[in-house]
Amino acid sequence: MKYKYLFDELIEQEYDKIQKGIIKSDQTNKRYEWKVIVSALKKPDLNTEALYQEFNNEIDKDITVEEYDEMLRAVNLDFEQKRRYISEEMKRMSHVVRKFLDGENQAIEQMEKFLCNLNERDQMERRLYFKAKYLLCHLIGIEKEFKSEEGKVVLAYCMEPFCAKILRMFYKDVIHEMGVISKKNQVNYVMENTRKVLLENSTKEVAGTDEEQMRFQLTNYRNTLELLETMFDELKESMDESATEARNEAVKDFFTSLNSSDYGNILDNILVVDKRLQKIRKDHIRIQPELMPLAIIFKQLMRFVKESEIRPIDQTGRKFVGYYNDIIKMNYEGEPYTNDKEKKRLEVVSPGWKYKDIVISLPTVREV
């Protein structure tokens, strides 16, 4: 494999970041995730209990079969049908990676296609697969040529979005060494793919009890968050850093789509949910344990928005008395003003958003 040294160098770089504390993980239980994936991909035809017995013999921690089953579900490998499909797919992709590292043109196209379809969902429950992590787990955990202690540490720390980033860097490093130019990360592709994913997530529904619907929402928000992180990384990577104006316009377009009614006004809604969670904590209301992950997901989504330098312009719920000139830079809902001296009682119903100094959307006020 002519270019395998590039894969090894990349894994060593990520390992060094972990050792230096640049990459951190506060989710200790997640460090067994890669071993769960490897156990499922090695013997996909075994039932859960048989897989658990083999898995439990290889780790240094007592885990119950119920916990193992929950971990399988967390990585969307909780059914034999899924495990068989993913196992075969990863075997095929491992073969593609070998050909890719030998510089074969057909393998370049296959790698690009794989990276363009990381948001595949299973046919049973329409839940997202974690294809980037599956592939790295298969390579480092099963394929002898790719095994390394550094790689295992990387797998223990890196969740799906970062695994996707590693594969993209790997792909870019290899094709750069080959002298090949890829079209995968063009801005238009990333934007269109993001819109498709957000649209699918926003239109998904589930029947059942309140708890079942809440669990569904939890999974959906987690999947959305991971996809957004991955796609936003792709968006930034696809830009020429010197093209500031083009990059700012693309980021504005990205978050405008994110906050449109077509995709559930995600930016506005996370503020509403965050305010409710703050009130729950203030009133010392106990959240059911099974719903606690939902609060964590919203917190992560809020952090993602803040780290992307997206800020609200106004405060939802703020009430004030305003003249027409006071709302020139706002969207207004209500009866038209009759003259410039007329005053109306107004309430901010949507805060508006900006990226750095660039306005993404104006605040919306409503007559009350």
Image (spheres, rainbow, N blue to C red):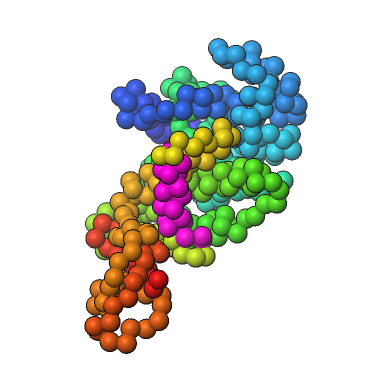
| x, y percent for residue 243 | 26, 60
- Residue 210 in the image: state x and y as whole percent: 65, 46
* Residue at 58% across, 47% down: 217
Taking the image as shown, residue 152 lies to the left or right of residue 329, namely right
Between 284 and 290, which is closer to the camera in this rendering? 284
Total of numbered circles in the picture?
Answer: 0
Instruction: Pinpoint residue 144: horizontal percent, then vertical percent.
Output: 56, 23
| In front of the other: 231 or 309 | 309
Q: Residue at the location (46% across, 41% down)?
A: 280
| Residue under the point 25% across and 84% down | 340
Check the image and name the residue furthest to the bottom.
338
Name the quadrant containing residue 10.
top left
Whether residue 64 is visible to the viewer of this picture, yes or no, is yes
Magenta stretch mostly in which secondary structure? helix
Residue 127 visible in image: no
Residue drawn at the location 53% of the way across and 36% of the way down: 287
Q: Is residue 271 magenta?
A: yes
Q: Magenta residues, as a range?
A: 263-281
Residue 338 sits in which quadrant? Answer: bottom left
Residue 100 against residue 195 in the figure, above or below: above
Q: Is residue 287 above or below residue 15?
A: below
209 sits to left or right of 183: right
Residue 142 placed where, x, y %? 59, 25
Q: Is residue 331 left or right of residue 189?
A: left
Closer to us: 222 or 288: 288
Residue 365 or residue 341, whichever sits in front: 341
Let me know if residue 255 is in the magenta part. Answer: no
The quarter in which the C terminus is drawn is: bottom left
